[in-house]
Image (cartoon, grey):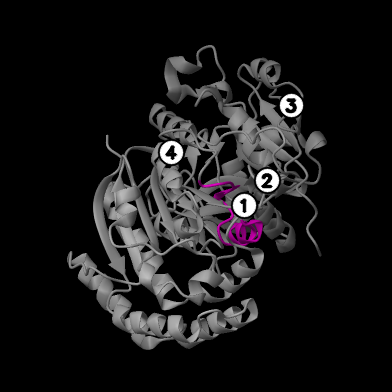
């Protein structure tokens, strides 16, 4: 049975926030200012982006302030309020008192959490399971709080949950987003606390698990509030699309038309087929990821993939940086849609790299693979990357190397140029050049010989002939074990700071001065 659209979300917003001290004396916790806005406004904006269209707010302490501030509609979400009774009935009691507005099945979350996961997928998982409840879980291993969940062997069900008495066997944590059938509350009339209700559902085999992969943010303590404020301030860096911008999609926000760009959906499809596993493209992505070591201790908070295409680098970034905010920019809508399928929580922008819709000093790291050779004004693009980088931020850029090897392959792919040694570094005005080296160095002599032969044999091929030649080139080299072996050796050499002055592609690592 196909799951219906998400109906209603229940937001538990009645807590006192006692751990926050004086900051909540006259302000309810959900209205605390975070990154310049009431926290609950951020949460509702997030829910709106996940197709939630109605929310029931269970409010208590200073609840009238929340209703006065938010009104009856916010970010396109209808807001309904249910006030706690004078005698506190606990979180499950608050939900029970709102069942008249919630219906028979609904999402439930706390009003002090910012949860980055696919709410629609969680809802489908809940609906298809047929169980009374769902709990989203994160493989926490004690990182952000005490782990309190044991999953079933198949990972589809919460086998045990105990918020108040966690055990060493518990490696997962309640992430904060749940779903309930109203029957769960009717079947357990004595459970006043949501955690107690979920404990009972897990005991009865009625609590489905949905695995989240990104860390949660919350505002329950002063330290958590400060961390969430810093995170959401980074998210504010994206500008609102201008009047007259093309319509956005679920996959991306549009700031420009997907027109007049030296690439195409047709080339994107060819790229999709070849670049995920081709040894040189895998090595290119790994070289960019390795370059992030220049960022220094700690992980970057915001990473921009400039020219993200189908999202393979974004997927590698998400695996390496589960807590980072990932931005992807491209001018091909088809590629952005595929990237969204791979990394649904990345913020994808249909935008021009020479006119990025990102505020100054907003990004920690920029990675870019095989983009600038398509850009007529590559100097302007580099200046724009510098603008959005924060002081001391890092940019790692890979482009095709060797102007003398430009042939039908480059023409077919729409390359404006291949880069001479030191050319990209010379164009990166205002940057400090940390490294200027190459990838694909060990196999470069063979590559050079083939390219020179191509320039002689295929001087003026037709567009059909060029495509056939390119497809044959890709097929011939895609599964090269020798190529894969040379890239592994090359990675080991670069790790030991051994750099060769030639290669198929140029790798330049830059730092924006402090």
Label 3 vs 4, first from the N-terminus:
3
Q: What is the distance, in whole Å, between disc 2 and disc 1 at their CAs?
A: 7 Å
Label 3 vs 2, first from the N-terminus:
2
Q: Which mark is residue 118?
A: 1
Q: What is the distance, in whole Å, between disc 3 and disc 1 at their CAs?
A: 27 Å
For disc 4, the marked residue is: 388
- Mark 3: secondary structure: strand
Q: Quadrant of residue 472?
A: bottom right
- Disc nearest the viewer among 2 and 4: 4
* 56 is higher (above) or lower (below) than 469: above
Q: What is the distance, in whole Å, between disc 1 and disc 4 at their CAs?
A: 28 Å
The outermost residue toward the top is 26
Q: Decide if residue 364 is on the left or right side of residue 305.
A: left
Q: Which mark is residue 50?
A: 2
Label 2 vs 1, first from the N-terminus:
2
- Answer yes or no: do the residues labelled 2 and 1 have beta carbons within 8 Å? yes
Q: Is residue 338 located in the magenta-colored stretch of the structure?
A: yes
Q: What is the distance, in whole Å, between disc 3 and disc 2 at their CAs?
A: 23 Å
| Residue 260 percent coordinates (x, y) | 64, 53
Label 3 vs 1, first from the N-terminus:
3
- Answer yes or no: do the residues labelled 3 and 2 have beta carbons within 8 Å? no
Closest to the observer: 266 or 247? Answer: 266
* 323 is higher (above) or lower (below) than 391: below
Quarter occupied by the N terminus? bottom right
For disc 3, the marked residue is: 82
């Amino acid at each position: 049975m196909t799951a219906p659209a998400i109906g209603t979300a229940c937001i538990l917003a009645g807590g006192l926030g006692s751990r926050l001290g004086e900051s909540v004396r006259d302000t309810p916790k959900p209205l605390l200012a975070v990154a310049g806005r009431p926290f609950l406004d951020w949460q509702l904006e997030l829910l709106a982006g996940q197709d939630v269209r109605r929310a029931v707010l269970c409010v208590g302490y200073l609840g009238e302030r929340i209703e006065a501030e938010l009104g009856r509609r916010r970010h396109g979400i209808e807001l309904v309020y249910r006030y706690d009774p004078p005698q506190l009935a606990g979180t499950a009691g608050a939900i029970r008192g709102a069942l008249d507005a919630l219906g028979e099945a609904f999402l439930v979350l706390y009003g002090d959490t910012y949860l980055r996961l696919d709410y629609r997928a969680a809802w489908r998982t809940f609906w298809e399971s047929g169980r009374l409840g769902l709990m989203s879980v994160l493989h926490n291993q004690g990182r952000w709080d005490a782990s309190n969940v044991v999953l079933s062997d198949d990972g589809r069900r919460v086998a045990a949950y105990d918020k108040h008495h966690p055990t060493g066997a518990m490696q997962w944590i309640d992430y904060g987003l749940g779903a309930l059938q109203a029957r769960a509350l009717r079947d357990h009339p004595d459970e006043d606390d949501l955690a107690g209700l979920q404990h009972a559902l897990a005991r009865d085999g009625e609590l489905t698990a949905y695995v989240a992969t990104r860390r949660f943010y919350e505002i329950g303590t002063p330290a958590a509030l400060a961390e969430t404020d810093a995170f959401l301030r980074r998210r504010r860096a994206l500008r609102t699309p201008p009047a007259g911008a093309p319509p956005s999609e679920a996959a991306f926000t549009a700031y420009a038309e997907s027109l007049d760009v030296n690439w195409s959906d047709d080339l994107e499809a060819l790229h999709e087929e070849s670049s995920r596993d081709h040894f040189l493209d895998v090595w290119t992505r790994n070289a960019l990821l390795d370059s992030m070591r220049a960022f220094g201790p700690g992980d970057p908070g915001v990473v921009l993939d400039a020219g993200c295409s189908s999202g393979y680098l974004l997927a590698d970034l998400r695996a390496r940086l589960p807590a980072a905010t990932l931005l992807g920019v491209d001018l091909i809508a088809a590629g952005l849609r595929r990237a969204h399928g791979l990394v649904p929580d990345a913020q994808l922008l249909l935008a021009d790299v020479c006119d990025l819709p990102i505020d100054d000093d907003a990004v920690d790291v920029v990675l870019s693979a095989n983009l600038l050779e398509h850009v007529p004004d590559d100097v302007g693009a580099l200046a724009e990357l510098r603008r959005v980088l924060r002081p001391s931020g890092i940019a790692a850029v890979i482009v095709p190397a060797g102007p003398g090897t430009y042939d039908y392959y480059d023409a077919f792919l729409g390359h404006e140029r291949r880069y001479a040694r030191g050319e990209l570094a010379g164009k990166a005005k205002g940057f400090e050049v940390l490294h200027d080296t190459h990838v694909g160095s060990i196999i470069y002599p063979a590559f050079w010989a083939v390219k020179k032969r191509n320039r002689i044999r295929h001087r003026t091929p037709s567009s059909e002939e060029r495509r056939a030649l390119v497809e044959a080139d890709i097929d011939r080299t895609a599964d090269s074990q020798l190529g894969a072996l040379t890239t592994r050796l090359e990675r080991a050499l670069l790790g030991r700071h051994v750099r060769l002055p030639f290669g198929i592609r140029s790798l330049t690592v830059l730092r924006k001065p402090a």
